[in-house]
Image: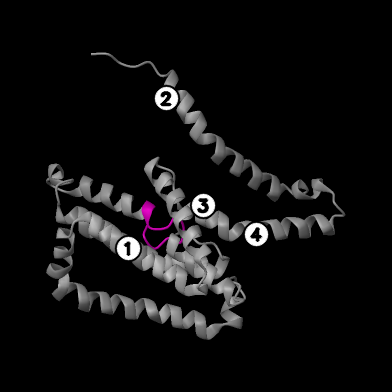
Amino acid sequence: MGAIPAGGAEIPTFLSYVTERRLSRHPEEFGSGAIEGVAGPESAASASSAGTLATMLTLGLPTTAIAAVMLAAFQQFGIQPGPLLFENEPELVWTLIASLFIGLVLLLVLNLPLAPVWAKLLQIPRPYLYAGILFFACVGAYAVSGQPVDLVVLLVIGGIGFLMRRYGLPVLPAIIGVILGPDAELQLRRALQIADGDWSTLVSTPFAVIVYLIILALLLLPAIRAVLSRRRPSVRL
């Protein structure tokens, strides 16, 4: 599941954890640092990185936050991911593929002898860690163009991200929307220009209708589940 190029690392990670817990002879140890519950999900997350890269390069669809940042970097340099990317930019594609192998080897070399050192970082108080992360984030944002407004944008976006994390809203769809939103608007205007402003061209094919129905079902599914869960009678002991 970790190698399937969809859903990012979250789905295979949770599936691996559930599978390890079902196969374990001591499921009661899960949740308290069982090695199976750590090694399995981490292996699935590492395997999903190749699938995430394949989806981003071939379809231009980022399924993780890291892939979304890479897609934004490609667009800044005028590189459009898609099937023609392998023909137009073969050096870039094969360099990225080779970087996966190099990165795995470096992780193996660094993590085995330095694992105790990384574990000691958890002893640093969280306020100090948060302060250091915020400092380097501000330095990086200001170094891009040297404008103070970049720091304001950083703090505003950080506040929005904090509220989304606080109330359980996923951050990745917002990142994907910011990146893919302008392209979606451009393609919508292009389609309407070709059809002379006729909105019915958006639903003129069975494939388009099926896609719209699937999107509508995905949007209504959480609301339907919430309504059904409220209607279920609670069992009192």
Residue visible at 14% across and 70% down? 117
Q: Which mark is residue 174?
A: 3
Decide if residue 46 is on the left or right side of residue 160.
left
Residue 184 percent coordinates (x, y): 66, 57
Amino acid marked by disc 3: Ala
Amino acid marked by disc 1: Ile
Q: Disc 1 and disc 4: Cα gap in Å?
A: 30 Å
Q: Which residue is mark 4?
A: 182
The kind of secondary structure element at disc 4 is helix
Decide if residue 226 is on the left or right side of residue 16.
right
Residue 81 percent coordinates (x, y): 58, 71
How many residues crowd around disc 1 within 10 Å: few (fewer than 14), some, or many (20 or more)? few
Q: Mark 1 or mark 4: which comes first in sequence? A: 1
Q: Which residue is mark 1?
A: 133
Residue 15 percent coordinates (x, y): 32, 50
The chief SS type of the magenta part is: loop
Q: Which residue is mark 2?
A: 229
Q: Which quadrant of the view contains residue 183?
A: bottom right
Q: Is residue 62 above or below residue 113?
A: above
